[in-house]
Amino acid sequence: MGAYGHPRGGASPPMAGGYGAAGMGMQQRGPVPPSGNVLPGRLFLTKMSPSISKDDLTNYFQQFGALNDVYIPAGKLIAFVGFNDASIATAVAQMQTHEVKPGCSVCVDVAVERPGGGKGLGKARFSPY
C-alpha cells in the first residue's frame, strides 16, 4: 500500500471560509493536474481527525459507489479510499472537503503513484561512514 502519495507532495493549502455545495460542508474546486501517474479509482485523504475510523470512511464514501478498499496507515492522519468505478472517484475528488461525520472533515484528492513506484526510504540520513 506504500505506493500511493499525494499529487502535490505535501499538505494542502488552508481552506477558505464558508460552505459550498448547497450547504453540505463541502468546498468545490477545479481539477488540479497531479504530478505523477493517477491511480484510477483511488482517493488520497488528508487532514483527518484521529477520531475518524475505517468504518466512518466506509460509511461515508460508499454513498457515492461501491468501494474496493479503505486504508488508514497506522499512526498517520491520512487515508486511501478505492472505488470500483474510477469515474466515481474522479467525481468525488472534485469536492475538496468532505464532512465524513459531524464536525470531522477530510481533504480529498486523487491518489498518484509515488516517485520511484514504491514505498520510499524516508528522509535522507547523514552517515559519516
Image (tube, rainbow, N blue to C red):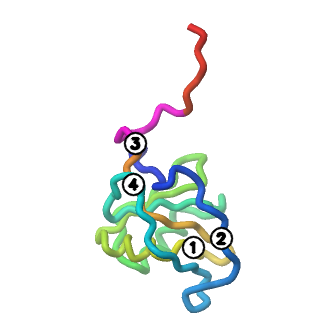
Q: Residue furthest bottom?
A: 22
Residue 10 x %, y %: 56, 51
Q: Residues within 10 Å of mark 2 (few under 14, many from 20)?
A: few
Which of 74/33 is in front? 33
Precedes in sequence: disc 1 or disc 3: 1
Q: CA distance from mark 2 to mark 3?
A: 27 Å
Spot occupied by residue 51 in the image (x, y as percentages of width and height): 65, 62
From the viewer's perspective, tell me whether residue 108 is left or right of residue 64.
right
Q: Residue type at mark 3: give it.
A: Pro
Classify mark 4: residues with Cα within 10 Å, few (<14), some (14-19) or many (20+). many
Q: Which residue is mark 2?
A: 15
Q: Which residue type does callout 4 highlight?
A: Val
Tag 2 near tag 1, CB within 8 Å: yes
Q: Amino acid at mark 2?
A: Met
**Above or below 112: residue 87:** below
Q: Main secondary structure of the magenta part?
A: loop
What residue appears at the point 57 percent right and 60 percent down from the top-left corner?
A: 46
Gap between marks 2 and 1 measured at Cα: 9 Å
Q: Residues within 10 Å of mark 1 (few under 14, many from 20)?
A: many
Q: What residue is shown with label 4?
A: 112
Q: Does the magenta segment cover residue 119? A: yes
Q: Which residue is mark 3?
A: 115
Q: Quadrant of the C terminus?
A: top right
Q: Earlier in the sequence, mark 4 or mark 1?
A: 1
Q: Secondary structure at mark 2?
A: loop
Distance of label 2 from label 4 (alpha carbons): 22 Å
* Magenta residues (range): 115-122
Q: Give the quadrant of residue 33.
A: bottom left
Is residue 116 left or right of 16 when viewed as pictured? left
Mark 4 vs mark 1, CA separation in Å: 18 Å
Q: Which residue is mark 1?
A: 97
Mark toward the start of the polypeptide (2 vs 3): 2
